[in-house]
């Protein structure tokens, strides 16, 4: 089975995010993931990815007026995040779904998926995971959830 870190994250998100039951401990989750066919290395990378996302809650948020700011992608980011996907991130920010701070966190988490091909669909899922993890983002999370499950967005550039 050729699975990657994102597949592990999706498995966890889909199986535990809406579950009102108490969450199993990490060791039990690792065993479940291994039994489901995921490789140990990918499981460890996924937990590291989630740990880093959880630590982001501790970072200070800034209340900067970014209405005039322009986000310039680094060469490394541009090599992984194509123009359409960059446009989708800009759309999310301009629509008020993500803030400049959450946009940076989304980009960070996308870049942490080192072997992934980043496309707008992957951005939607990572954005949903980031917004779920951030306090006070319930409305933005609901908007992204509707975007993912109700109707795809077709952007015109």
Image: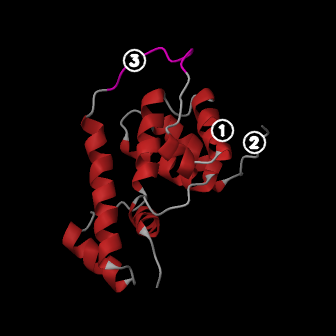
Q: Residue furthest right?
A: 156
- The reply to whether the C-beta atoms of the residues labelled 1 and 2 are less than 8 Å apart is yes
Residues in magenta, as a range:
61-69
Residue 113 sits in quarter: bottom left
Residue at position x 29%, y 62% in the image: 47
Look at discs 1 and 2 and give the one toward the viewer: 1
Q: Residues within 10 Å of mark 2 (few under 14, many from 20)?
A: few
Q: Is residue 25 visible?
A: no
Instruction: Identify the mark at residue 155; answer none if there is no mark.
Output: 2
Q: Residues within 10 Å of mark 3 (few under 14, many from 20)?
A: few
Look at discs 1 and 3 and give the one toward the viewer: 1
Circle 3 SS class? loop
Q: Earlier in the sequence, mark 1 or mark 2?
A: 1
In the visual, does 3 lie left or right of 81?
A: left
Circle 1 SS class? helix
The residue identified by callout 3 is 63
Percent across and percent down for residue 118 are 56, 55
């Amino acid at each position: 089975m050729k699975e990657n870190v994102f597949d592990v994250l999706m498995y966890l998100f889909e199986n535990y995010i809406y579950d009102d039951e108490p969450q199993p401990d990490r060791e039990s989750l690792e065993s479940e993931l291994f039994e489901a066919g995921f490789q140990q290395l990918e499981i460890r990378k996924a937990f590291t990815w989630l740990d880093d996302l959880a630590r982001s809650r501790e970072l200070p948020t800034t209340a900067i007026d970014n209405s005039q700011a322009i986000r310039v992608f680094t060469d490394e980011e541009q090599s992984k995040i194509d123009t359409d996907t960059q446009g989708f991130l800009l759309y999310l920010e301009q629509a008020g779904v993500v803030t400049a701070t959450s946009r940076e966190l989304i980009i960070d988490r996308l870049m942490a998926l080192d072997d992934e091909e980043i496309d707008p669909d992957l951005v939607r899922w990572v954005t949903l995971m980031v917004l779920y993890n951030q306090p006070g983002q319930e409305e933005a999370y609901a908007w992204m959830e509707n975007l993912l499950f109700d109707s795809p967005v077709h952007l015109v550039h």
